[in-house]
Amino acid sequence: MFCNSCGTHIQAGQTVCPKCGQTTWASSQAGVPVAAPGVAPVAPNRVVHHVNTLGILWMVYGVLTGFGGVMMLIVANAFFGPWMQNQETPMPPFIRPMIGFIGTILIIVALARVLAGWGLYAKQGWGRILALIMGFISLIDFPFGTALGIYSIWVLLSPGAEQQYHQLSYAR
């Protein structure tokens, strides 16, 4: 028998998948969920189906954000470095630190996004909270951050999402 949720091989007597924590369906009782003693069966929801995709999207978005931050640091040092101050029309002195500061902030945000994605993908207990925080922060980052933030909130704050995610994190 195989798990209907993740496809893991399940032994004949098992009622809960050892990988994802989903209750198995009894072949002899057409559609009646079988749960371990004292555990109420949980209907599958969107967390099981979307958590890996969401984790990958957060990691990719974090890498792209980090690339932008690194490029800003390179631009700040290459184009607005001290050697550019000797030109006929020197740049204002606040430009280089401002671009460097923005690049540093982007790198920090990128690290948080990658960490949130890894936490979701690895089904860590803290991954859901960090992804929700980053999702709410990213709502102002139109259009990709807004889309990813809405997707994160839709998946991770759906009814029963916290219980489903905790089952996934404890089953690993």
Image (cartoon, rainbow, N blue to C red):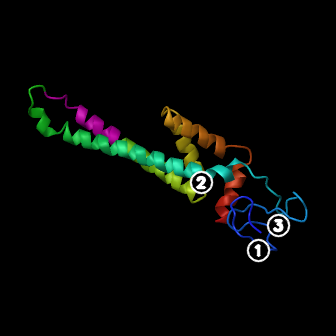
Mark 2 vs mark 3, foreground winner is 2
Query: In this rendering, would 140 be left or right of 19?
Result: left
* Dot 3 amino acid type: Ala
Give the residue at the far top of this rendering.
89
Query: In this rendering, would 89 be left or right of 151?
Result: left
* Dot 2 amino acid type: Asn
Q: Which residue is mark 1?
A: 11
Residue 81, position in %: x, y?
Answer: 17, 39
Residue 39, position in %: x, y?
Answer: 82, 62
Q: Which residue is mark 2?
A: 52
Q: Which residue is mark 3?
A: 36
Q: Where does the N terminus fall, quadrant-wise? A: bottom right
Q: Which stretch appears magenta?
A: 90-103
Query: In this rendering, would 37 be left or right of 64?
Result: right
As helix, strand or loop, the secondary structure at mark 1 comes to loop
How far apart are labels 1 and 2 at the CA level? 25 Å
